[in-house]
Image: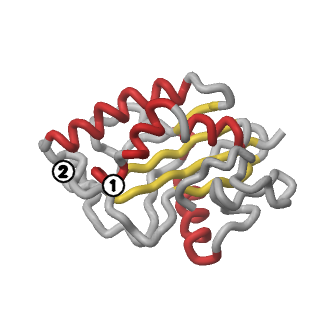
């Protein structure tokens, strides 16, 4: 049975190493969100570095998730002191569980605050695609799909909640999971 890969990417207003209260708040909310998402039905796993320090993304050991990569439009720093991005790569059993996890609980509260932390851009902030059972998506896969989505719009191999596709390539119900509560595209 195929699984659903999800890559998210956002450019932060300040580097991850920024000492301001807003950056600390972002980290604190993230620290609470990840365990909640991890307990959500349908969640299979997400990319985590093996032994990286806070803010270390580039050069960290991500294991089977591959070398960390970012879209071509990211033009900020790549060191622990200058990196100004947040990215996730996760695996799900399907659209409904991913949708429920993203749009409920602590993550929903964080989404409501996203413009406190993230720059507004003309680029998509997430992309889905289906992978075969046993396949672990890589950061490079996520970047390639997000860039494809940006250039060509939703398609069976790179889509959003709002314009989702089933594993067989047919369009999914409006809103991806049929709940009707979508924001972003």
Element assignment for label 1: helix
Above or below, 82 relative to 55: below
**Image label count:** 2
Outermost residue to the left: 19
Quadrant location of the C terminus?
bottom right
Position of residue 135 in the picture relative to residue 146 (left or right):
right
Determine the image quadrant of residue 104: top right
Q: Nearer the viewer, residue 103 or 128?
A: 103
Q: Nearer the viewer, residue 45 or 108?
A: 108
Residue at label 2? Answer: 81
Q: Which residue is located at x 37 percent, y 35 percent?
A: 30
Quadrant location of the N terminus?
top right
Label 2 vs 1, first from the N-terminus: 2
Above or below, 77 relative to 113: below
Q: Position of residue 88 (x, y in %)?
A: 48, 45
Position of residue 138 in the picture relative to residue 83 (left or right):
right
CA separation in Å, label 2 and label 1: 22 Å
Position of residue 20 in the picture relative to residue 35 (left or right):
left
Q: Which residue is located at x 28 percent, y 43 percent?
A: 55
Q: How is the image coloured?
A: secondary structure
Depth check, mark 2 against mark 1: the one in front is: 1
Q: Which residue is located at x 36 percent, y 29 percent?
A: 31
Q: Which residue is located at x 61 percent, y 63 percent?
A: 145
Residue at label 1? Answer: 115
């Amino acid at each position: 049975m195929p699984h659903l890969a999800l890559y998210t990417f956002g450019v932060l207003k300040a580097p991850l190493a920024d000492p301001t209260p807003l950056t600390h708040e972002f980290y604190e909310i993230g620290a609470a969100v990840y365990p909640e998402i991890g307990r959500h039905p349908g969640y299979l796993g997400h990319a985590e570095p093996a032994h990286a320090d806070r803010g270390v993304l580039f050069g960290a050991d991500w294991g089977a998730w591959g070398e960390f990569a970012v879209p071509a439009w990211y033009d900020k720093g790549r060191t622990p002191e200058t990196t100004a991005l947040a990215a996730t790569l996760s695996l799900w059993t399907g659209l409904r569980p991913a949708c429920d996890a993203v749009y409920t609980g602590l993550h929903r509260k964080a989404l409501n605050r996203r413009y406190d932390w993230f720059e507004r851009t003309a680029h998509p902030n997430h992309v889905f695609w289906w992978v075969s059972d046993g396949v672990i998506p890589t950061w490079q896969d996520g970047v390639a799909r997000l860039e494809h989505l940006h250039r060509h719009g939703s398609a069976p191999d790179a889509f959003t909640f709002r314009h989702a596709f089933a594993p067989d390539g047919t369009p999914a119900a409006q809103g991806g999971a049929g709940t009707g509560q979508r924001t972003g595209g």
